[in-house]
Image: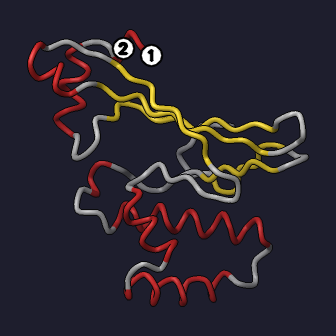
Amino acid sequence: MWKFYGEPDTISNIKKHMTGDPVVATAIFAALDKSDTLRMKAVNIDFDPRLFDTENKVKLIDDVSEIPANSHVSMGHDEIAEEFYAGASSRAKDYMTRYVSQIAGLPLHQRRAELFSKLIELSVSLHPNKDQLALPVDVLQIRKGTGVYWARVKPNCPEK
């Protein structure tokens, strides 16, 4: 991966579609620690845009952060997912009040899957640069004791 993203041509192509931070790749890693507690880390691979623009050299930077327990992770445009998750605007409050009542009768694990699927859907459909992401999405849950559970799999996804 470092070799691929370390190529100036790769970074030039990524820059054509970049609208914000110089992130070239993102991954989420999750596992249970020795005390059986779920631990998650987010890893962004960034590049130094000033060095690239001035010298056409690629310097990759790994940005690793701990994801707090009982939080969520978006792989889309976070600002919209956060707006709706937090009810930070009147449109978000109105929409989420209606949506949460629609899924209220589902079991907890399915409600969570539906909620986070909807947040990703909203982050794509409402973002001004919506052509950068595509629907539908897969939803993967990591469950204590049972491991990975595919809560939703898009029709064109290869076997898990």
In the rendered image, residue 91, in percent from the top left (x then y), is placed at: 37, 85
The answer to the question of whether label 2 and label 1 lie on touching residues, with beta carbons closer than 8 A, is yes
User: Which residue is tagged 2?
Assistant: 4
Q: Quadrant of the C terminus?
A: top right
Residue 102: name its quadrant: bottom right
Q: Is residue 82 shown above or below 55?
A: below
To which quarter of the image does residue 113 belong?
Answer: bottom right
Residue at (20, 16) in percent of width and height: 9
Image coordinates for residue 133, horizontal then vertical, percent: 35, 50
Look at the numbered disc 2 and give the secondary structure of its residue: helix
Q: Is mark 1 on a helix, strand or loop?
A: loop
Q: Residues within 10 Å of mark 1 (few under 14, many from 20)?
A: few
Judging by the rendered image, the residue that carries numbered circle 1 is 1
Height in image: 114 above or below 100?
above
Q: Which amino acid lies under the numbered mark 2 shown in the image of this protein?
A: Phe
Residue 7 percent across, percent down from the top left = 27, 12
Q: What residue type is labelled 1?
A: Met
Which residue is found at the position 62% from the left and 51% from the top? 153
Q: Which residue is drawn at 29% across and 16% down?
A: 59
